[in-house]
């Protein structure tokens, strides 16, 4: 429970730099929150997450992307060519991409199943990276791939809880990219991630009369009031753009 | 006639939304008035949303009329539906279908941000009648309300074409609701 003097005090915001999203969140993600960015393939989760980091790096905040499945090199090659991206951010170390499989290998964690001790080591390594690099924005893409190795719900719960608590203490705002199946009625594959995260951004494909629209919805965000409406998004060289989803009595599926 | 139409447009205050009613035969006079006289005089970037004929045809017509397209960009909502986007113009971007009204708004937003010039903006929607073929009135009403108000907040001029021959009462009602005024083009 917050101290009496803190009640009603507006929390410091981490502006995502995505104007539409910051508006939905009344100024940005409350700093230190751990947010699940969840959706099926092709919904724009990675693009949105990378844009969040680039804007942070441009604003002078050290930003770290931990790639779990795809190599960073391949990711950067396939990324949209943002008008606002500056290669100096990489050179200056403001924006860093790390491949988690390389860390697994160095730590001797290149096995398919982690026990509780392995999970603790992984958490510690990530937190140490964030501390040493003075990271203020972190993306783990995807947390689902990490969770596959953690196997049990207890391990997953402990990992996200410990990670979120430690990162919040360091003032780091974190996006955990979560992969779900199209049409899933849950926000995460294992059902645990969504309960522990401070926020949930749902990205989806909406089919309407044969048209496929990319949508975004803020389902939960601790520490701020926010819109809960569904928005249509476009991934463009000027970044993610949002407009309200038109209802018009013709939306076939939700 | 283009001079007269341009004069009427020059009187508009900033951020105006105008319903421009015309007969089909006056279409090119109106286009010339807007893109060759009004927009250059006001130093405007023009964003032309075409839902009726492909942007390539309009660009060709502008070339014949000797109207430069340096400050004109096109949001083409019809070429992909007609499967005719093989030759893409650098000043045109495409929306898959005129039913994707959100994407239409997003492409306009993108072009406005991408142009990044310190000029005011003019958005031309050609036409409400074509959009009404592909969309029901409820969603069209909602779209125009959001779109026009959003453009108004950016201090942009919005001109919505309406072809008299194809106007219905419903279309007239929508236009009256969202536009500040109606200009009817009369022939000689």
Image: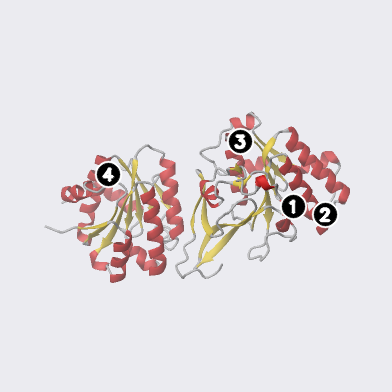
Q: Secondary structure at mark 2?
A: helix
User: Residue A166: where, in percent of width, then height?
Assistant: 76, 43
User: Would residue B52 be found to the left or right of residue A253 on screen?
Assistant: left
Residue nearest the viewer, comparing A222 with B156: A222
Name the residue carrying label 1. Answer: A145
Q: Which of pointers 1 and 3 indicates the residue nearer the eye?
A: 3
Name the residue carrying label 4. Answer: B39
User: Residue B144: where, in percent of width, then height?
Assistant: 37, 60
- Residue at (77, 41) in percent of width and height: A126
- Are the two marked residues, 1 and 2, in contact with CB atoms closer than 8 angstroms? no
Earlier residue among tags 1 and 3: 3
- Residue at (33, 55) in percent of width and height: B125
Instruction: Tell me the chain of label 2.
Output: A
Q: Quadrant of the C terminus of chain B?
A: bottom left
Badge 2 and badge 3 in a common chain: yes
Specify the quadrant of the image occupied by residue A194. bottom right
- Are the two marked residues, 2 and 4, in contact with CB atoms closer than 8 angstroms? no
- Are the two marked residues, 1 and 4, in contact with CB atoms closer than 8 angstroms? no
Crowd around label 4: few <14 · some 14–19 · many ≥20 (10 Å) = many
User: Would residue A59 be found to the left or right of residue B73 on screen?
Assistant: right
Name the residue carrying label 2. Answer: A155
User: Residue A199: where, in percent of width, then height?
Assistant: 65, 53
* Numbered mark located on residue B129 in the image: none
Crowd around label 1: few <14 · some 14–19 · many ≥20 (10 Å) = some
Instruction: Tell me the chain of label 3.
Output: A
Q: Which of pointers 2 and 4 indicates the residue nearer the eye?
A: 2
Name the residue carrying label 3. Answer: A57
Instruction: Tell me the chain of label 4.
Output: B
Q: Which of pointers 1 and 2 indicates the residue nearer the eye?
A: 2
Residue nearest the viewer, comparing B98 with B15: B15
């Amino acid at each position: 429970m917050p101290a009496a003097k803190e009640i009603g005090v507006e929390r410091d915001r981490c502006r995502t730099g995505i104007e539409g999203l910051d508006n939905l969140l009344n100024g940005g993600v409350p700093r230190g929150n751990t947010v699940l960015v969840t959706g099926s393939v092709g919904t724009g989760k990675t693009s949105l997450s990378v844009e969040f980091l680039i804007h942070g790096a441009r604003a002078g905040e050290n930003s770290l992307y931990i790639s779990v499945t795809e190599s960073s090199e391949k990711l950067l090659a396939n990324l949209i060519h943002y008008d606002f991206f500056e290669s100096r951010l990489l050179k200056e170390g403001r924006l860093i991409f790390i491949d988690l499989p390389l860390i697994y290998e160095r730590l001797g964690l290149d096995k398919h199943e982690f026990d509780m001790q392995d999970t603790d080591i992984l958490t510690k390594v990530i937190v140490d990276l964030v501390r040493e690099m003075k990271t203020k924005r972190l993306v783990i893409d995807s947390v689902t791939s990490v969770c596959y190795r953690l196997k049990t719900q207890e391990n997953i719960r402990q990992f996200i809880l410990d990670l979120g608590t430690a990162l919040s203490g360091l003032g780091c705002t974190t996006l955990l990219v979560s992969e779900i199946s199209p049409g899933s009625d849950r926000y995460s594959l294992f059902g645990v991630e969504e309960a522990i995260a401070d926020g949930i951004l749902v990205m989806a494909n909406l089919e309407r009369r044969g048209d496929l629209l990319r949508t975004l919805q803020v389902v939960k965000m601790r520490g701020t009031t926010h819109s809960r409406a569904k928005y249509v998004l476009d991934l463009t060289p000027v970044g993610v753009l949002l407009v309200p989803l038109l209802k018009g009595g013709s939306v076939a599926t939700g | 006639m283009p001079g007269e139409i341009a004069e009427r447009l020059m009187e508009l205050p900033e951020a105006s939304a105008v319903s421009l009613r015309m007969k089909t035969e006056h279409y090119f006079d109106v286009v010339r008035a807007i893109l060759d006289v009004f927009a250059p005089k006001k130093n405007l970037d023009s964003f032309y949303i075409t839902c009726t004929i492909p942007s390539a045809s309009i660009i060709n017509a502008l070339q014949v009329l000797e109207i430069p397209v340096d400050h004109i960009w096109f949001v083409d909502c019809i070429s992909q539906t007609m499967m005719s986007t093989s030759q893409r113009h650098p000043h045109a971007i495409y929306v898959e279908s005129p039913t994707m009204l959100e994407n239409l708004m997003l492409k306009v937003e993108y072009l406005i941000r991408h142009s990044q010039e310190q000029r005011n903006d003019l958005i031309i929607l050609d036409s409400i009648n074509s959009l009404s073929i592909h969309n029901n009135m409820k969603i069209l009403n909602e779209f125009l309300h959001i779109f026009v108000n959003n453009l108004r907040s950016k201090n942009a001029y919005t001109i919505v074409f309406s072809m008299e021959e194809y106007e219905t009462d419903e279309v007239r009602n929508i236009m009256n609701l969202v536009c500040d005024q109606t200009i009817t083009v009369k022939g000689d």
